[in-house]
Amino acid sequence: MAFAQTHSVALQGAVGHLIDVQADVSQGVVGTTLVGRADASLNEGRDRVRMAITNSGLEWPATRRITVLLAPADLPKAGTHYDLAIAVAVLAAADAVPARALARTALIGELSLDGGLRPVLGVLPMVLAASRRGVDRVVVPEPHVAEASLVPGIEVIGPRSLAQTVAMLRGDLPPEAPPVPELSRGSYLRWRGAARLDEVDMADLVGLDEAKFAVEVAAAGGHHLLLTGAKGCGKTSLAERIPGILPDLDTDEAIELTTLHSLAGSLDPTGGLIRRPPYSAPHHDASKASLVGGGSGRVRPGQVSMAHGGVLFLDEFALFRTDVIDALREPLENGDITIARGEEVVTLPARAMVVLASNPCPCGNAGARVGRPCECRPMEIREYNRRVRGPISDRIDITRVLQPPSPQHYDDFTGRDATARIRAKVTAARAVQAERYAGRDWRLNGQAPGAELRDRWPLTLDGAHQVNLAVLAGQLSRRGAVRVHRLAWTVADLLGVERPGVPEVMTALDLRLGRSLPESLMRRWAA
């Protein structure tokens, strides 16, 4: 047989495309030609494949002309994971592998010169894409078997070498081979929720009732949050406890998040789907590419995508670089991030709950009850706070100014606002939203389009009037009015109100504008 076809997968961000890997071995000028818009690493695969076949004790058709097509030919191809599919296609075209064994089968893996298989990034989204295109069986390097098995209804084969792969396809007993070296995955444990985050509780924080209510509203509706206050007032402690009050991710969300971690190489292959909301807290010196994604070669997810479905905490936000701050506009507004480089345009999900924290001044002492007084000049304070204002602040739903707790707060400590209690209320509110938005592309109030809210879930007339008054008074932009509308629905869901009216709208305005909350509301919340 002079022609054979196998399958592999091309990735564009988190989206996979099934690729036909076709090989033709025929008479002609001796040589190997690879066509189908292959990048440099893929073109180098011709030599890797040839040496892997030879060193595996198999016969390379050295006296024939070999042409390999990666179809569709107009789709750019990149990466080393095509090696295994190319090698098997060439062997099948040379009658070394039965063609019938390749039906509805995709092959993924890089080859070393001795014929061993090496792991690659992004196996989970590749297998997902192959399964959706009718592939019944995938062949992946042995360390990726657990990861590929996360996709239901597909047979997974995990050889260690090309020789083992060929033997399995022939139905022979596979030869012995050394173990495949595992992919370097870095400190993936921090993405799955560091142990210390499971050990902290909202009950540890005293004197922050208004801030706790604001966090509860933000968690229930998926709203972005800005915390300001003097250093030591509890901003970081409050943010670290937010993942604990979030419910587990549903299956669709867990698959999205696990896929992103697979692309980044930070997935623990033995841990299954990531069910707990992640928590990411990058340093303020982080680069734009590390935060929103990019990098050299294949686009990798940034931390805003790695925190998808969880919490992205940006402490000392005013110290982040200007290009990083500007790049956050898209994920804050749309819940995704688009990275365009030359011919490559990649869109990655980034529906993280963004929590910003900032001091009131560069030294952080303004408003502090203890310690040295603020020594910053007015011009320094204005420049410092300018970075937190403007387009970014308009995309933040809730603003809270935290005050350090006074001594009587510790005397009144009862521990009633425990994480488990708040998580139960957040879970109940999200269940109400899931029922309301069933069959739509969004799940939470914080993600609902403004036009849909106005048409299908409007405020009461009196409530809408309060929002319009705030817009006319210059307290809200039109974007801010939409966010108040979303917040009002979340407050109503938490308090068990069927439709938000004036009380819920006024609470939403207080949360949006950073005003103190009424005592009557706080008593009702604490009951």
Image: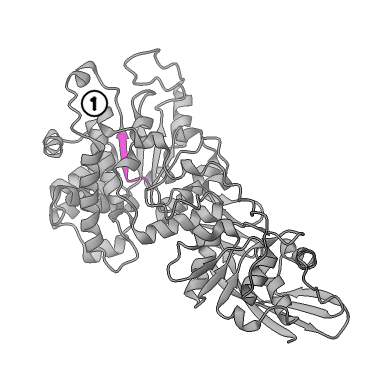
Tally of marks: 1
Q: Is residue 76 visible?
A: no
Residue 444, given in percent of the width and then of the height, sits at 29, 56
Q: Nearer the viewer, residue 355 or 181?
A: 181
Measured along the vertical axis of the image, is residue 267 above or below residue 372?
Answer: below
Circle 1: element type: loop
Q: Nearer the viewer, residue 194 or 320?
A: 194
- Tag 1: residue type? Gly
Q: Which image quarter holds the C terminus?
A: top left
Measured along the vertical axis of the image, is residue 308 above or below residue 365?
Answer: below
Q: How is the image coloured?
A: one colour
> Does the magenta run of residues contain 399?
yes
> Does the magenta run of residues contain 481?
no
Q: Tag 1: Cα neighbours inside 10 Å, few (<14), some, or many (≥20)?
A: many
Name the dominant secondary structure of the magenta segment. strand
Quarter of the view holding residue 164: bottom right
Q: Which image quarter holds the N terminus?
A: bottom right
Query: As drawn, is 81 to the left or to the right of 227?
Result: right
Report the residue at 34% width, 25% height from top.
233
Residue 392, given in percent of the width and then of the height, sits at 42, 44
Residue 15, given in percent of the width and then of the height, sits at 52, 66
Report the residue at 39% width, 33% height from top.
196
Magenta span of residues: 396-400
Q: Is residue 146 visible?
A: yes
Report the residue at 57% width, 53% height from top.
300
Residue 59, given in percent of the width and then of the height, sits at 80, 73
Q: Nearer the viewer, residue 32 or 166?
A: 166
Where is mark 1, residue-wise?
Answer: 207
Q: Nearer the viewer, residue 308 or 371?
A: 308
Measured along the vertical axis of the image, is residue 516 above or below residue 493?
Answer: above
Query: As drawn, is 184 to the left or to the right of 491?
Result: right
Measured along the vertical axis of the image, is residue 113 above or below residue 406?
Answer: below
